[in-house]
Amino acid sequence: MTIPSPAEHRMTLARALASAQELFLRLTEAGFVLVGFIVLVYILLGADSGPYVGSVIANLTGLITAVTPQALVGIAIVLALLHLAKRKG
């Protein structure tokens, strides 16, 4: 039995972290698709869409009203900086 070198350990750790990052990305995308589907159901059925759909819409409405214009500007700046960093790198 051979002992892996530190470089092999780093590569294994890097692969594991990349795999975990990919998993979290896919779960986040699935969550956004689910919320989008719930909003579509609410648009199509209105108030008769059920209590769960209504609670999701109420939470989204509360989130949208809680976000201030200053927070939107901050989010836009962070996204622009991330875009620039990815473009240069």
Image (cartoon, rainbow, N blue to C red):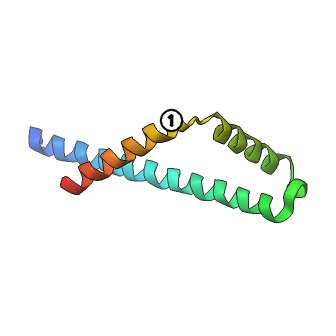
Q: Which residue is mark 1?
A: 71
Q: Is residue 2 visible?
A: no
Q: Secondary structure at mark 1?
A: helix
**Image point 70% across, 37% down: which residue?**
62
Residue lying at the far front in this picture: please name it. Answer: 69
Please determine whether, in this image, residue 78 is positioned above or below residue 34.
above
Tell me the kind of residue under disc 1.
Answer: Ala
Residue lying at the far bottom in this picture: please name it. Answer: 44
**Image point 50% across, 41% down: which residue?**
72
The front one of 42 and 9 is 42
Image coords of residue 56 (percent x, y): 74, 45
Image coords of residue 19 (percent x, y): 35, 51
**Image point 69% across, 44% down: which residue?**
60
Left or right placement of residue 68 versus residue 76 in this view: right
Question: Which quadrant of the rendered structure holds the N terminus?
Answer: top left
Image coords of residue 76 (percent x, y): 43, 45
Please determine whether, in this image, residue 74 is positioned above or below residue 46.
above
The front one of 88 and 20 is 88
